[in-house]
Image (cartoon, helix red, strand yellow):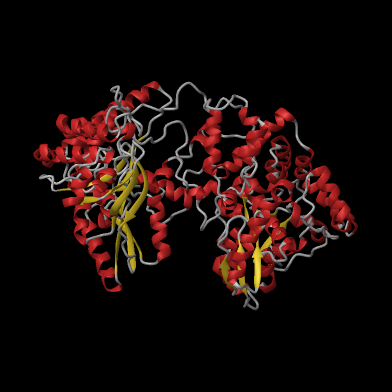
């Protein structure tokens, strides 16, 4: 923040880092620790008299201010954001009467010293905020409205283009975004309750033009967070674009006077047309900083040449319009080469003097901002890692065509660190438990990138240490598939790489056991209650831990003496069954043999809503095998199921399941089958189906509404596939008072929580969930996943499936 003079969306009202820093403590090149602050009078003279690096720097800065006053006045652009070069216009008085060394060190990019302490000005948080998303035909039309919005004293004026809006709509189902929107301005106002309403309408009136398509207002905190989610995820959302053409940052940081933004965008568009490039645009429009992101394939020499040419052409336009090359991200490799053209030979020489005074031996971040002592200056191409490797050389068992290859999926991570959050959402459970980089999705993605680009040994990706250190603690919760703005599906990558490991070393016994859970559950049910007794005794658990690696502290799920399939064979359908149509209920491994009450409830609810229910003889959905990297095994199960279900899917009969991990597996059959017989499109959860097809009509079917307070923990895979809110909505329609438990993965994650080496991690995540449930003080706890239910049962928490609750109140 300090080194770059960083500034976010609210700098239009609250300024940049430099505007809010009082003083900075630094370690200088001679090892002395110095405070950089405002100096005048005797204190200034004392510092200037010192024979050390701070004294040299102060004397040099004072001399530059006196000698180059007119040059500084003329050369520094009239923009609100400027992180280009060193800040001479605010750090030295023209007559040398004062210095503000804090202004100099902020934005110096670590080239003058190492910052160890910062004293900041604090601002009280606003009493209230309100926001609105204003849609336009295109980015130039949106940019044309920016200048007028500033008269309303907004706290933010942000722009996003059609690419960002489209990816947000597709990734998160944001139907608030019109399909024909070419761009949007996100406006925010802040203040007290009296000001806020008038301020928002004033800003909207100023933003309205002939090109305005509509407005989405947000007064509640939740609605505002939804609008801001689009803007905050703009950069990583672009990484959802499959293939080698991505949007590198190299012309993204120019700051232009806001009134010049339409002309700037028009001239940049002409440059992009000349070089046959598309680009996305978003950024801090209110301060004239728009992040223009051309799509390039930097693995090719042609696009590396276009990178150079476009960079030079665009920065010429920036300077012509009175802007600066860096508004917040700094100069570094990308923009240091353009500083002399921006400030002129005289001031650029002054920058070099400052660097030599503070750091004559190039200890700190050499060749940035100014050349090092040997004349080297970092360039736009320095450090490019895309050269001479094939990221898709690995022959995969899963289909990665939708991702444009496994390498493209790995490279989607842009390092935004969303996976390192510890508050709301699911991602990333292993990071939340251990808070280390390698247990985050980003850490795993970077390790995988290093493995495919040659920085690690050729066989590293299938080595024991890579499996254990990088992949092992991934729970395959699939939260990164949707919560990660770039959509890095680490669960899919883990499955593929475990498969590669098995191909090299063979499949371990424990993996074979878990992959065959349906066979084991069927056998356990047939032998119940004897099987339950054997599974509960200590000696049996000791044997399982020693031979298979299933932790003895983990309770095994009980087997039902009458399976759901046996019950259904003797079931007499309800009189209303078939009035609305027919559905298939997929009997998952746990519904079939461990929790038949879930299957019975599903049938009761579906028939009560007018559907005839078919329960075919199926194989395992394949999820247990996929979680173990046994792709060939999963493919056999999937092929059997596709053949069995084809007769239904060909006549558009939906395939329903009460187990979210089964739904996610069925939806991913295209990854393992050439012909999935329409199963992925037909598969959904029972709750999601009922919500869409029955909806509010459910109220009429409720005999006596539920009155209990229910806390619902949703399965991670239901969140990833977008049907996590369905059971909540149904329970509310049935009269229950419902809260969603705001917690990450329960920690069970199928087989993960049974494995000895993972038990403690799994347990800690479960205890976190249990604590969140306690805080809600519910009468009933409902969860949609068998794994989640087992985890909570081991913590002495009784749970019930939402379908069972619905069945209790449906006629």
In the image, residue 747 sits, relative to residue 69, either above or below, namely: below
Q: Left or right: where does residue 610 sit relative to residue 509?
A: left
Q: Position of residue 321 (x, y in %)?
A: 17, 39
Instruction: Decide which of 510, 231 is in the foreground and name it.
Output: 510
User: Which quadrant is the C terminus positioned in?
Assistant: bottom right
**Which residue is rendered at x = 34% and y = 36% of the image?**
30
Residue 754 relative to residue 87: left or right: right
602 or 372: nearer the viewer: 372
Query: Quick check: can you spot residue 27?
Result: yes
Q: For this rendering, which residue is in front, 596 or 423?
A: 423
Image height check: is 369 above or below 430? above
Give the residue at x 62% y 69%. Answer: 774
Residue 498: x, y in percent?
67, 36
Q: Position of residue 267 (x, y in %)?
A: 21, 36
582, 240: nearer the viewer? 240
Q: Does 68 sit above or below residue 661?
A: above
Number of numbered markers: 0
Image spot of residue 261 (x, y percent): 21, 44
Residue 748 appears in view: no
**Quadrant location of residue 636?**
top right
Query: Looking at the rendering, which quadrant does residue 163 occupy?
Result: top left
């Amino acid at each position: 923040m300090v080194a770059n003079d960083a500034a976010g969306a609210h700098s239009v009202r609250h300024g940049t880092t430099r505007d809010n820093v009082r003083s900075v403590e630094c370690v200088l090149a001679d090892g002395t620790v110095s405070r950089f602050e405002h100096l005048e009078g005797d204190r200034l003279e004392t510092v200037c008299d010192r024979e050390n690096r701070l004294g040299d720097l102060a004397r040099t800065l004072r001399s530059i201010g006196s000698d180059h006053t007119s040059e500084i006045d003329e050369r520094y652009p009239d923009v609100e954001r400027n992180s280009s070069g060193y800040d001479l216009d605010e750090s030295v008085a023209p007559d040398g009467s004062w210095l503000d060394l804090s202004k100099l060190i902020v934005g110096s990019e670590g080239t003058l010293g190492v910052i160890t302490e910062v004293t900041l000005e604090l601002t009280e948080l606003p009493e209230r905020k309100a926001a609105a998303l204003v849609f336009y035909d295109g980015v130039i039309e949106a940019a044309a409205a920016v200048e007028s919005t500033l008269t309303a004293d907004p706290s933010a004026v942000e722009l996003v283009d059609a690419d960002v809006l489209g990816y947000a709509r597709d990734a998160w189902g944001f139907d608030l975004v019109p399909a024909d929107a070419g761009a949007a301005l996100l406006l925010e106002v802040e203040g007290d309750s009296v000001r806020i309403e008038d301020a928002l309408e004033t800003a909207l009136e100023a933003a309205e033009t002939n090109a305005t398509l509509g407005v989405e207002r947000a007064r509640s905190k939740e609605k505002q967070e939804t609008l801001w989610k689009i803007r905050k995820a703009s950069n990583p959302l672009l990484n959802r674009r499959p293939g080698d053409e991505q949007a590198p940052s190299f012309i993204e940081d120019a700051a232009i006077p806001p009134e010049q933004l339409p002309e700037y965008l028009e001239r940049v568009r002409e440059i992009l047309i000349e070089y046959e490039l598309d680009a996305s645009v978003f950024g801090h429009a209110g301060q004239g900083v728009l992040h223009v992101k051309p799509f390039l394939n930097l693995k090719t020499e042609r696009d590396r040449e276009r990178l150079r040419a476009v960079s030079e052409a665009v920065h010429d336009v920036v300077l012509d319009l009175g802007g600066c090359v860096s508004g917040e991200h700094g100069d570094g490799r990308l923009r240091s080469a353009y500083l002399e053209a921006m400030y002129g030979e005289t001031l650029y020489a002054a920058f070099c003097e400052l660097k030599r005074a503070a750091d004559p031996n190039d200890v700190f971040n050499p060749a940035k901002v100014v050349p090092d002592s040997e004349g080297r200056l970092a360039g736009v191409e320095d450090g490019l890692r895309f050269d001479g490797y094939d990221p898709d050389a690995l022959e995969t068992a899963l289909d990665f065509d939708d991702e444009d290859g496994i390498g493209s999926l790995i490279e989607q991570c842009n390092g935004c660190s969303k996976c390192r959050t510890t508050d709301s959402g699911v991602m990333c459970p292993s990071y939340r438990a251990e808070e280390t980089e390698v247990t985050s999705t980003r850490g795993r993605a970077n390790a995988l990138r290093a493995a495919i680009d040659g920085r690690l040994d050729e066989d590293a990706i299938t080595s024991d240490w890579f499996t254990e250190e990088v992949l092992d603690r991934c729970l395959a919760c699939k939260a990164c598939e949707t919560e990660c703005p770039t959509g890095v599906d680490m669960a899919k990558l883990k499955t593929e790489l475990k498969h590669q490991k098995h191909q090299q070393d063979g499949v371990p016994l424990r993996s074979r056991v878990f992959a065959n859970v349906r066979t084991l559950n069927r056998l356990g049910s047939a032998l119940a209650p004897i099987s339950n007794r054997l599974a509960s005794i200590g000696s049996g658990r000791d044997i399982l831990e020693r031979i298979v690696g299933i932790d003895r502290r983990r309770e095994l799920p009980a087997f039902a003496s009458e399976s759901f399939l046996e019950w259904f064979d003797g079931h007499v359908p309800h009189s209303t069954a078939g009035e609305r149509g027919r559905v298939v209920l997929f009997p998952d491994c746990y519904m079939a043999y461990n929790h038949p009450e879930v299957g019975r409830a599903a049938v009761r609810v579906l028939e009560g809503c007018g559907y005839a229910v078919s329960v075919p003889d199926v194989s395992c959905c394949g999820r247990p095998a996929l979680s173990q990297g046994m792709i060939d095994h999963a493919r056999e199960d999937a092929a059997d199921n596709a053949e069995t279900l084809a007769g239904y899917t060909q006549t558009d009969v939906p395939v329903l399941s009460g187990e979210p991990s089964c739904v996610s597996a069925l939806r991913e059959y295209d990854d393992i089958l050439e012909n999935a017989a329409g199963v992925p499109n037909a598969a959904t959860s029972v709750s999601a189906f009922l919500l869409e097809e029955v909806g509010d009509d459910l109220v009429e079917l409720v005999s006596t509404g539920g009155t209990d307070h229910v806390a619902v923990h949703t399965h991670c895979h239901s969140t990833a596939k977008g049907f996590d809110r369905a059971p909540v909505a149904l329970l509310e329609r049935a009269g229950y008072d419902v809260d969603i438990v705001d917690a990450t993965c329960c920690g069970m994650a199928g087989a993960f929580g049974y494995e000895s080496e993972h038990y403690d991690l799994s347990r800690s995540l479960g205890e976190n969930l249990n604590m969140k449930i306690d805080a809600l003080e519910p009468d009933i706890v409902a969860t949609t996943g068998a794994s989640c239910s087992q985890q909570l049962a081991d913590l002495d928490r009784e749970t019930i499936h939402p379908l069972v609750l619905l069945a209790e109140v449906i006629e």
